[in-house]
Amino acid sequence: MLSRFMSGSIRNLEREYSCTVRLLDDTEYTCTIQRDAKGQYLFDLICHHLNLLEKDYFGIRYVDPDKQRHWLEFTKSIAKQMKSQPPFTMCLRVKFYPPEPAALKEEITRYLVFLQIKRDLYHGRLLCKTSDAAMLAAHILQAEIGDYDPGKHPEGYSSKFQFFPKHSEKLERRIADIHKTELMTCLATRPSLPSVRLGLWCFRETKEFIFSNGELHFKQYLIC
């Protein structure tokens, strides 16, 4: 009887495996799925976990034993795509930037796009002009600490944040200047919005050139 139970348990283990997906906020989602499960099943589990409805911009990425990054194909078996043995570890990432972020309907989508932009800037994967990089960093700063307040934000306050792999003091000062002045002009006429959504709204209202230049870049830019 015991041997039958053990053999049945072993067969179940062989049919299932553990999968951990690292999310954009650096938390992890772990689940057990069937060995023949396809990528779409795992993606749907994650979207349900996050209550993510605007799914088209996102994908699941994994790294093979040769350190090459791949996007998980949703129509194929997960186990057949992986070149390693379970348990598997993958990442949820933005696969395509939306051409008009301010048009996103869900707060969770805006937040995840914000985290991806922040991550790509920090790792040097989002290539743009220095002026655009400073503007993006200033909006990230706005989302992190809110409105500029001279009583709370002394000289050099932006140096506490690492926006890029490396940057000059001149760029750091420019980021602070934008946060102090240009964003305050935007904020004076802002709608009542949470900080992340507000940042995307301010991009659209005050710096159309970022999206006129960035739109083509974002549409063609497949994050790798």
Image: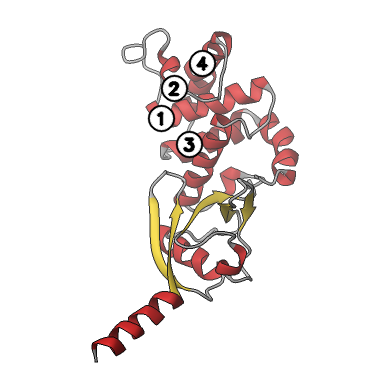
Foreground pick, 201 / 31: 31
Labels 2 and 4: the sequence-earlier one: 2
Which numbered disc covers residue 181? 4
**Image point 47% across, 61% down: which residue?**
47
Find the residue positioned furthest to the bottom.
1
Task: Say which residue label 2 marks.
Answer: 161
Question: Mark 1 packing: few (<14 Cα in 10 Å), some, or many (20+)?
Answer: few
- Left or right of residue 46: residue 221: right
C-alpha span from label 1 to label 4: 17 Å
Labels 3 and 4: the sequence-earlier one: 4
Labels 1 and 4: the sequence-earlier one: 1
**Image point 53% across, 14% down: which residue?**
172
What secondary structure is found at the residue carrying circle 4? helix
C-alpha span from label 2 to label 3: 20 Å
- Left or right of residue 221: residue 25: left
- Left or right of residue 129: residue 85: left
Find the residue positioned furthest to the left.
2
Position of residue 75 relative to residue 171, above or below, is: below
Evaluate if marks 2 and 4 touch, with contact meaning CB atoms under 8 Å apart. no
Tell me the kind of residue under disc 4.
Thr
Tell me the kind of residue under disc 2.
Phe
Position of residue 88 relative to residue 25, above or below, is: below
Q: Position of residue 154 (x, y in %)?
A: 36, 9
Task: Say which residue label 1 marks.
Answer: 144
Evaluate if marks 3 and 4 touch, with contact meaning CB atoms under 8 Å apart. no
- Left or right of residue 45: residue 4: left
Labels 2 and 3: the sequence-earlier one: 2
**Which mark is nearer the camera, 2 or 4?**
2
